[in-house]
Amino acid sequence: MTEKQTGQGRDQDKERSEQMVHELVQRIDSHPGDADAYYELATVLVDLNSFAQAEELLMKALGLFAAQPAAVEKLHYGLGNVYYAAQDYTKAIAEFDQLGAQLKGAGYLMMAQSYMASGDHKRALVFGLTALGSQPKDIATLQVVAENLLALGNMDQAAQYYDQVLALDDQNGRANFDRGLVAMVQGEDYGPYFKAAKALDPQYFEKGQKKLADIERFIQTQKNETKE
């Protein structure tokens, strides 16, 4: 895809999002008691990087629907996603941490992702495993657990979780690439994983070259230490 085509695609996505904003504003005007419309509008505003507007909208909605516990929980989840997208992970975690049973699993997953994004892989792993308790076959949760295990150097366990991800979704380019890294460290055949990753998610494969170089250096260092 050329740069021009990519730019046209972005413009079209922006136009669609702006049209959705218009439609959702009209929906709120005609049905002010529709909490889902506020949630959906905030989601579209996040897509447009209008984080302050999305936050303001959800704060207003939390006041309007204070007497509806299910709506309040969903709006807090939406607000957590606004903060997460804006990279304000402390505020995001505070929102996800107060969710009730209905969204607890999704909240724990987002807490794991928030801690992971802020570089705290140990806490991210704890919340990822907690989320997995209520959604053991959720691909995103399994992948978050695997990625944090990889970051912490727990290769045997990382391999087990990546294998679960790929059993559920063998077209997952990111998981294929990271499973290849684990295989490389463990002295296994990693070629098929990297081949699949390159075909399925070339962008992640390219971005992963630094990881690959770091792993290769680590393996070489280990070999040199063994020789000594």
Image (cartoon, helix red, strand yellow):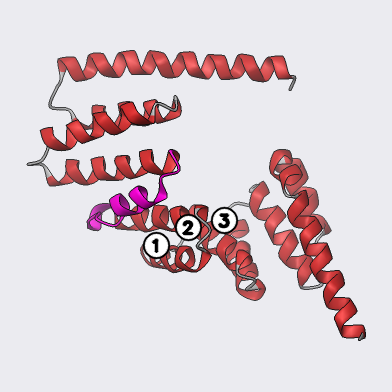
Magenta span of residues: 86-103
**Main secondary structure found in the magenta portion:** helix
- Report the residue marked by disc 3: 168
Q: Alpha-carbon distance for marks 2 and 3?
A: 12 Å
Instruction: Please indicate whether residue 69 sits to the left or right of residue 143 in the image.
Output: left
Q: Identify the residue at image location x=54%, y=14%.
A: 12
- Report the residue marked by disc 1: 131
- The one nearer the camera, 20 or 195, is 20
Q: Amino acid at mark 1?
A: Ala
Above-or-below relation of 185 to 225: above
Q: Identify the residue at image location x=75%, y=67%.
A: 183
> Is the Cβ of the residue at disc 1 closer than 8 Å to that at disc 2?
yes
Q: Which numbered disc flags the more N-terminal residue, 2 or 3?
A: 2
Dot 1 alpha-carbon crowd within 10 angstroms: few under 14, some 14 to 19, many 20 or more: many
Q: Alpha-carbon distance for marks 3 and 1?
A: 17 Å
- Report the residue marked by disc 2: 141
Q: Which numbered disc flags the more N-terminal residue, 3 or 1?
A: 1
Above-or-below relation of 88 to 7: below
Residue 33 image position (x, y, % from top left):
12, 27
